[in-house]
Structures are given as C-alpha cells and as structure tokens.
Image: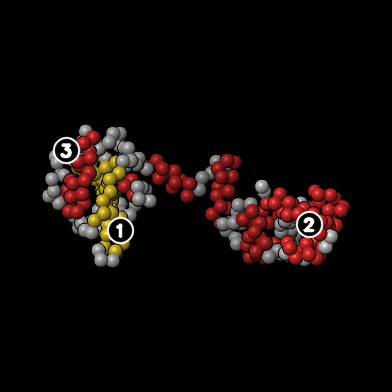
C-alpha cells in the first residue's frame, strides 16, 4: 500500500467512525485529530465523494523568475565573447554605459547567466573563440600549437604487457600507526597484463623488505602458475636503493627492474587493488 492509499484509508475510517458514533468529538479523540481537520475532510467528502479524501499532490515549485530579457542576454553574450578576459564586474560596467545599451546588471546576475551558458571562466570563453577562429580562418593559437607538438612527441605508456609475468608493478602504501604495533605498510604487486595482485602487510619499509616480499610471496605464485617473472616496475619513491642492489635471490639474470616517477598512480597499476 502506498502512502497516498494509507492516508486515504485513514480518513475514510475517521468519517465512518464519526457516522457510527454520531459524535464528532469522540471520534476525533479516538483518532487524535482536531474537529477543524475533521470538518475539512468532511467538506471534501461531501463535495467530491471518497476520492476527495486523497491527499493533494504538491505541484511543481516555480523557480527563480528570469531577470534578463532576450536583448540583455544577447548584449551580455556579445560583450563576453568580444572581451573574453573581462570579469562580471567589468562586463556590467561596460553594459551600463548609455552607448552600450544602459543595462543595469549586477555582477552576480552576469555570472549566473555565464554559468548557465557554460562561459563562467576566462578559459572557457577563450576556448570558444579558439574553436571559432580555427573553423573559420584556420588560425591556431600558441597554446594549441604547443598542445599539438606535445601530442606528437608524447611517448606511449610503458605500463603495458602482453602476458602474465612480463611486467609486475610493485608499490607500497602507508596504512598508519597501530597501537602496540607501530607503523604499518602494505606491499602490493600487480600484474600489468591480467591485473592479478598479491598484497602483504609489514612493519618494515625498505628495499630489502620489498625484495623479500617478491621472493617469498610473489615468485611462488608465478612458479605455481607456470609464468616466469621477467620485469618489475617500481617508483623508488622513498627507498634508499633500488631492488637490483639489495642482493636478494629474486634478481635473476632474466629479470630486470624499471622505475617511474614517484607518487604517480596513473603510471603504476599496483595502486589500483587497494583503492
């Protein structure tokens, strides 16, 4: 039963109880309502029948009335695109001059209109003009030229692998300081080809601990699956030395280590499992 149906049934019971008792005051006391409310329901019942006891549905609330006319919006948009670096206060002062229409517009009103049309920042207004000039005159700004040059020189992502074991991303995450335990870190190794991950919690943060994690936890998993571990990617963010200099047994001749920028989760897939 919906809420409207429940309210309708309750009001019908009140009307029926008052008719059965012949005493409106006693029926109102039993149901915990006032006689004023009862007579309001009774008038709707006599005028519209049982359907008149359904609760009224709230109509849509009227929003903020438009404060700008079509002419003012056109003038404001023309000035904003003609002078894309001007703010709402300067645009309002420009439009307030008699030779520019004499529009008396507050900066807040101008900003609301620019936000409604998607031009609330200088960058967005300049971007619209840049696209327009590129489509009409074929002109490119210095920013667009720099972006195109960077896109041509951009190298492909190096976090990529075709088969498991070809590239394993290793990273650490500081969990926090636990009472009675001390500082705790999480070591995570994630395969770039299949996104399979192995994690371990440790109270030691060093390259030796990371190498032991690879030797004791990660390598047995790949040996059991029959996939050789060929390459490990780390960021060497806070470790005193790379894994290749730890002297552990994981550094086989066919295994090598690669590094990327520290604190760059978009380049290291090992941060995905714990996010």
User: Residue tagged by mark 3?
Assistant: 254
Report the mark closest to the observer, 2 or 1.
Answer: 2
Quadrant of residue 201 within the rendered picture: bottom left
User: Is 194 on the left or on the right of 127, as rendered?
Assistant: left
Q: Nearer the viewer, residue 220 or 37?
A: 37
C-alpha gap between disc 2 and disc 1: 68 Å
Q: Residue at x 23, y 35 (%)?
A: 225
Query: x, y percentage for residue 32?
Result: 72, 64
Numbered tag placed on residue 17 in the rendering: 2
| Callout 2–callout 1 Cβ contact below 8 Å | no
Q: Which mark is residue 137?
A: none
Q: Secondary structure at mark 1?
A: strand
**Rendering quarter of residue 14:** bottom right
Task: Work out how far the residue at label 3 is from the one at label 2, CA to CA, in angstroms.
Answer: 90 Å
Task: Examine the image and state in which quarter residue 44 appears.
Answer: bottom right
Give the side of residue 225 with respect to residue 160, left or right.
left
Counting residues from the start of the chain, the first of labels 3 and 1 encountered is 1
């Amino acid at each position: 039963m919906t809420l409207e149906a429940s309210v309708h049934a309750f009001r019908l019971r009140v009307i029926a109880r008052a008719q059965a008792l012949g005493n409106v005051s006693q029926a109102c006391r039993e149901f915990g309502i006032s006689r004023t409310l009862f007579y309001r329901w009774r008038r709707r019942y006599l005028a519209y029948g049982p359907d008149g006891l359904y609760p009224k549905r709230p109509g849509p609330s009227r929003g903020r009335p438009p404060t700008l006319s079509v002419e003012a919006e056109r003038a404001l948009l023309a000035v904003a695109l003609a002078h894309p670096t001007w703010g709402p206060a300067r645009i309002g002062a420009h439009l307030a001059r008699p030779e520019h229409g004499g529009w008396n517009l507050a900066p807040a009103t101008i900003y609301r209109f620019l936000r409604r049309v998607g031009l609330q920042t200088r960058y967005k207004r300049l971007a619209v003009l840049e696209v327009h000039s590129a489509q009409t005159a074929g002109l490119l700004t210095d920013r667009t030229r720099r972006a195109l040059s960077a896109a041509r020189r951009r190298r492909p992502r190096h976090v990529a692998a075709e088969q498991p074991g070809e590239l394993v991303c290793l990273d650490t995450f500081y969990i926090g300081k636990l009472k009675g335990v001390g500082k705790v870190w999480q070591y995570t190794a994630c395969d770039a080809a299949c996104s399979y991950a192995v994690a371990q919690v440790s109270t030691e943060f060093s390259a030796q601990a990371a190498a032991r994690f690879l030797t004791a936890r990660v390598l047995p998993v790949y040996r059991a699956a029959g996939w050789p571990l060929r390459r490990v990617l780390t960021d060497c963010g806070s470790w005193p030395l790379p894994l290749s200099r730890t002297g552990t047994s994981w550094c086989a001749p066919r295994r090598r280590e690669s590094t990327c920028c520290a604190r760059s989760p978009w380049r290291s897939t090992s941060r995905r499992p714990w996010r």
